Image (cartoon, coloured by chain):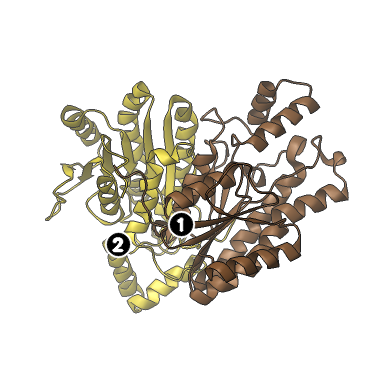
Amino acid sequence: MEKELIGKVALITGGTKGIGRAIAERLSEAGALVIVTARTRPIETHTKHHFIAADLTIAAQTDKMVNEINEKFGSIDILVNNMGGSTSPSGGFGALTDAHWENDLQLNLQSAVRIDRAILPQMVEKKSGVIIHISSVTGTLPVYQSLGGYAVAKAALNNYSKSLSKEFSPKGIRVATVSPGMVKTDTMDAYLQSLAKTSDLSIEQVTLDLMDSLGGIPLGRMALPQEIAELVGFLVSPKASYITGVNYIVDGGSNPSL
Amino acid sequence: MENSTKELRGKIALVTGGTKGIGKAIADKLASNGATVVITARKPSEEETGHHFIAADLTDNSNIAELSGKIIEKYGTVDILINNVGGTSSPAGGFQMLCDDDWNRDIELNLMASIRLDKAIVPKMIEKNSGVVIHISSLNGKIPLYQSNFSYGVMKSALNAYSKTLANEVAKNGVRVNTVSPGMVKTTAMETFLESYAKTISKTVAEASQQLMDSLGGVPLNRLAEPEEIANMVAFLVSDGAGYITGANIVVDGGTYPAV
């Protein structure tokens, strides 16, 4: 691994599990000082990462977190807005209440907006910085049966990330989106279990059904979290210096359109 | 600090149009990452490249059979195929300027050359259940420019569709296929093009360059890419780290493409 991120400070939200954890490890291996956030401290923390407890759906906690980072580590060079997810029920449009919609938007869009707002001024001052938004292939390929609110919030995040790139790329800040397809995380495993329970099918069957509902996955499997982290590691590095305003899909070929 | 990882050690890479511009940058990058690199072009480079050069005009089908024969004989296989050859010699000035010959030349160079070479090499990859194919397209495939690049843009769109379709077909055989669409890149070919375009529109080269950037809707990073910045992405895509990426069209354009 090249140590191309030595001297860089990276903040990864939702960095204790799944894709976020894989990204934290990848950036740390490349030499970055890594700060991870989550609502609760994990039982085993990565010894090299700095952990800050924060519920980023609450505005006051975002400000507190950013102040704490500024005091302890100085400014952020790399911001990976990885936090996201959904606790909304499956079952389509009729199953979603206003509270579900608001929750999905807070978790997947507004949390990122607030952190970007808090961090961007420092990046503008330095004329340098990289922001990554972790979205989802469902933002371009909605799956109404199970993830309606989540997918809509991710589509909003994609649009937001693109707008942000247009405004801040001329100021030396690169902004990009990464949209993973199905990734084999603990959250995904739990989600598949709950789907299996709801539909009274085996986990293998609901996995296949979900892959089919995406129109099939040419590579025939889910991604490993590391396969998402590798792309993020590339995008935040100096090698990606001409890359901004893009939405890169890492989905084993599932998105059917060009 | 290690300058570069040698993650492509033991891999055979073929880069078409590998003596100049983006192709040369890709060949150099893959070699510095450990790959054995074979490059093609119609004529050898005047400078020493350090790569194995095979002369081939890829718009000529018999040249392709000869090229793949030579490579398979010497190396037994190709692990990484970069279809980089492309370009246009069609005149600027829009639809009415283009005759059938212009269209046919652009089709041969930007689409058929890749199809024929893939046809020769991809079966070997399927046999081994492993391989990566990259098609170098252009942002013009997504943002057509009728003023200067009409038929070229159309052919790059066709290449994008072809690359996606091939990816769908061979994913199950362990072969990944991706497209890379650069925006404006600072190559000698680009400089030549800007000079000729400047002449056509009776402007300076700087004005022509700015006009082209404006006609793309503006470039947020406000500069052309260096060839190395395209090569870096290609090197990532052919590496194991990109193992879940197939059927993608990866745009490297400084933010030019305006849509979400």
Which image quadrant: the C terminus of chain A?
bottom right
Residues B232 and B15: in front is B15
Q: Colour of chain A?
A: yellow
Kindly identify which residue carries mark 2: A185
Q: Residues within 10 Å of mark 2 (few under 14, many from 20)?
A: some
Secondary element type, mark 2: loop
Q: Residue furthest left?
A: A43
Q: Which mark is residue B35?
A: 1
Residue type for callout 1 = Ala
Residue at mark 2 to residue at mark 1: CA–CA distance = 33 Å
Residues B206 and A51: in front is B206
**The chain coloured brown carries which letter?**
B
Q: Nearer the viewer, mark 2 or mark 1?
A: 1
Dot 2: chain letter: A
Across and down, in percent, residue A136 comes to 42, 53
Is residue A122 placed above or below B11 in the rendered structure? Answer: above
